[in-house]
Image (cartoon, rainbow, N blue to C red):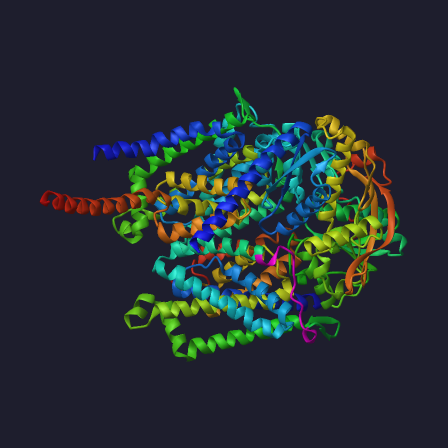
Amino acid sequence: MAQQRGRGMLKGMAVLAALVVAGAFGLGRAGASAEELRIGLIAPLTGPLAQTGMDMVNGFQMYLDEVNSDLAGAKVKLIVEDEQGKPPVAVQKAEKLVLQDKVHLFLGGVLASTGYALAPVSTRHKTIYIVPIAAADDLTQRQKEQYPYLIRTGWTSSQPTHPFGEWACQKGYKRIVAIGADYAFGHEVIGGFQRSFEECGGKVVQKLWVPLFSIDFGPFLSQIKGDVDAVFTMMVANMTLQFPKQYKAAGLKMPLLGGGTSADEFSLPFMGDEAIGYTTALQYSAALDTPKNIAFVKKYRKLYGKVPSYYSESDYTTAQWIHEVMKKTGGKWPGAEKFIEIFRSIKLDSVRGPVELDDQLNPVQNIYIRTVEKKQNFGYPDKELWNTIVKTYEHVGQYWKYDKAEFLKQPVYSRDFPPCKYCE
Amino acid sequence: MQFWIIQVFNGISYGTLLFLLASGLSLIFGVMRIVNLAHGSYFLLGGYVALTVIWSTGSWLLAIPLASLAIAVLGLVMERVFLRPLGFEPLRQVLLTIGFALLFQQGALDIWGGNNMDIKAPAALDWSLVVGRIYFPVYRIFMIGMAAGVAIVLWLVMEKTRMGAMVRASVDDAEMARGVGIDTSRVSMAVFALGAFLAALGGVIGGTFIGVYPGLDFEILPLAFAVVIIGGMGSLRGALVGSLIVGLMDNFGKALFPEISYFTLYAPMVIILAVKPTGLFGTE
Amino acid sequence: MRGGTTARLLALCVLPAALALAVPFAGPYVTVLAARVCIFAILAMSVDVLLGYTGMPSLGQAAYLGMGAYLAAILATRHGIGLGCDFFAVLLGGLLLGALAAAFFGLFAMRAAGVYFLIITLALGMVVWGLAYRWNALTGGDNGINVFRKPVCGVDLSNGLAFYYTALALFVLVLAALSLLVVSPFGRTLVGIRESEPRMRMLGYNTWLHRYLAFVIAGACGGLAGVMWTHLTGIVSPQDVFLITSVDALLVVVLGGPGTLIGAALGTAVVVFLRDYLSTLVPWWQYVLGGVYVLTILYLPEGLMGLPARLRRQSSELAARKAVTLRESASVESRS
């Protein structure tokens, strides 16, 4: 028995040795013919934001697996770092990626604050930082000049809500209450909505700011004015599930509108029927009815057991975008400046639709107005909640219809801007 | 008027949830003189285990006792294997509970994943009672009832049973209790398991109301602290009064002064502590 | 005995010094982490003064770190102060702010002892966190404040090496100052208070004042560390002030060994490397960290610093046993 095991071990070691030798040869050959492209991905993998981070990594990895980690001849070495949901840790991990691993570019960060923390690192080390998720407006607006190496492949917070405000107004809503998480991201999402909604003739008659991560909405629900046409929400993370439930239990019946994160695919599978009819705006919906997206959703769901969220889609699309750049360079790293130039020139046919960058390196893309429906979709057997697209605004940039120079003159959307001039 | 009625109702229902969490924390402190920093973890783990039970059996009613008992066993093991061998060294024991809180956090993430989840209430509780123009969510009424039931049972156990008398004696003076032949080791084991049981119960009941998600453990813990600080450590009555005060204060703070709602809880807590370090009902 | 002292001296001074100087050879990321260790160790040592020497477990020390950090960030970004040689003035400012804040908070905290102290400091820490989070105009709220430039005074602190040596120098300075403090009569009184406050009071010491001063000194160290903290990563956010940072500061002291000062630094080094270095290598680093921590508390009440003594005890037992066997075998040999 012992002898047998010994022989098994010997055999195993022989196989291992063979593998090592083969691997060494393989590496040697790859090194000779192709370049190594080192990419750092910074995402929260522990702590409260861990699932978001895993969605991001999964999306990026799925694309790499599809192309066998071979971007036009460049072999990708992906280094994933855990930022633990803390901006200072993200900074240190970024420095590790740049200084020790000598990555060509890094991407990631979930929170706006992490985006703000990582952006200066890219400037300091003249290394490209791609922002797939963090949506803080000013990263690609008022502060963009400070971050020449920053490319955004996701969105700005107010980008989807600019057209959404107009949609709500054209839909016939006159008076709306806005309730949202009280931090920069919430201010920007609601600010964008308020501006276009009011310019079209609507009135935001009340703004309620809820402390971030509040789970009991009791204190706020009882203050919502009853005589309005709709309620606009801006929820994130754990708040998303509780709001519609407590809203319904409080006897409120006005239709619910919301920022993209209020009912995105990250939360939707865990919501109940109270979410039906929730209308939100974002640059992606898993229910998007295009062959590209259907294939993406099916494959992703098979691999990871859940419908992809925009976190996954954005990272998948980022990987695709990098691939397109490498195709143009023939797999050679072109240097940071040149990389940005090529990146910008590409009009990408992505899962979420056509995407391209504006001159501040923020995507111009479709914005989807989506309503939650319970239905069978894409041939899945069960009735599930899906973000059915009710209207598509094509080619929406971060300034939408507004003049860029004029837009940049106004302060960034905040708690008090735009002022609530119709508040009662 | 309507505003006040709703806010008071909300505050009380939130407070009752805190009572489930804080009563155990308070009793554990009373008997063992340790602040159990893993108490928020019990709350969260209770919710997670309940979800597992619901996924596999479909029964919400079954989830309540199973999850609470499972976590009670976890608490029991923790007390027996790790805390007890340290003897009477409150500080080291407190520090140990922090270590466990961190381990539980990672364990829960690896077992249940990091999604924001929710325990669906049974249909019988998922509606609202309408009085005049005011909606009273039945689930909140259920929460109040549940906590009231627990409070009464706890009170009866503490006042009328032998075990309760032993616990009270240990709270008052552990050395004296040992002196008169009370097995304080067994008392602390029982109290620790009971505390874990109550916290997990809170987690299951609260899971419907506030969700089950990573990070909840450290979000709810400071609230439970606020309760026992205000009410006084080791006092059941203090935990009850403290819960209601914190529930109402949190609620009115957010409703009336949302701008400074982060202090409406902690600033009064500091002041109460400074004036009466042992809390309203605590004894040194 | 003399050999023992030399060995001890070697272990306590020369070895760490050599290590500290050798750090840059381990690569730029390790240098960044080492700087982090130096800075956080200052905060940890301040906790040790409270916990290890005075018996007051503080769970709100991040408040002072945060104040120093926000002070440095606000002065640098709004007023352009502290980016030249006036950086040292800001360091002093952080120290003073920390001391002042602690002097105010101490009035509340000193009312409590033991576990109550733990909780009241926690509550005070949460108040400061709330301020950082809420007071948008001053602190930038959730987004925090970015400081783009690092101080330049003779040397450019944006150079990782220069920054590391500055942090190291500050650390050594604080270590020296606190070491003097704890062996002074004042420090001995603190230890007396830790052992038995009533006895010290009976002996005529103003124990309240001693504890209060210890608290203020700890706050000052926290504020000082905060200024460096800002320049370490170039960002300050409410995360830095949150409960978790305070918990960390307490944990590293317990891990390293309370009442030793240098243990706090050792604990910091272990935690930073487990968390920030091991996490770049394996995904299950949290279990290692939690495990090391729990095992230390269970089996090494004196922390990692207690390890040599324990080993020595064990090895001397072993040696004794060996000596016995040797003698036995020798006697056997001589007989044959």
Q: Residue furthest top?
A: C154
Q: Is residue A274 left or right of residue C154?
A: right
Residue stretch in magenta: B111-125
| Residue A222 visible to an observer of this rendering | no
Quadrant housing the C terminus of chain C: top left
User: Could you say where residue A418 lies in the image, as x and y percent from the top left?
Assistant: 78, 45
Residue at 78% x, 30% y: name it: A328
The quarter holding residue B31 reads bottom left
Q: Residue at x 74, y 36 (%)?
A: A322
Does residue C218 lie above or below A218 as drawn? Answer: above
Q: Is residue C315 visible?
A: yes
Viewer-side residue, C288 vs A274:
C288
The percent coordinates of residue B41 (x first, y second) are 53, 59
Say whether residue B283 is magenta: no
Q: In the rendered image, which quarter is residue C298 located in?
A: bottom left
Q: Quadrant of the N terminus of chain C?
A: top left
Can you give x and y, in whole percent of width and height, for residue A324 in the image?
A: 78, 35
Residue B115 sits inside the magenta stretch: yes
Residue drawn 83% across the image and 36% down it:
A347
Relative placement, left or right, of B108 versus A401 is left
Instruction: Find the residue positioned furthest to the bottom.
Output: B160
Q: Say if A394 sits above or below A151 in the image.
A: below
Residue, x 42% and y 42% (percent of image)?
C267
- From what the image shows, is residue C286 above or below residue C91? below
Relative to C181, is B206 on the left or the right? right
**What's the magenta bit mostly, secondary-structure-wise?**
loop
Q: Relative to the observer, which residue lies in front, A325 or B82? A: A325
| Residue C249 pos. (x, y %) | 46, 44
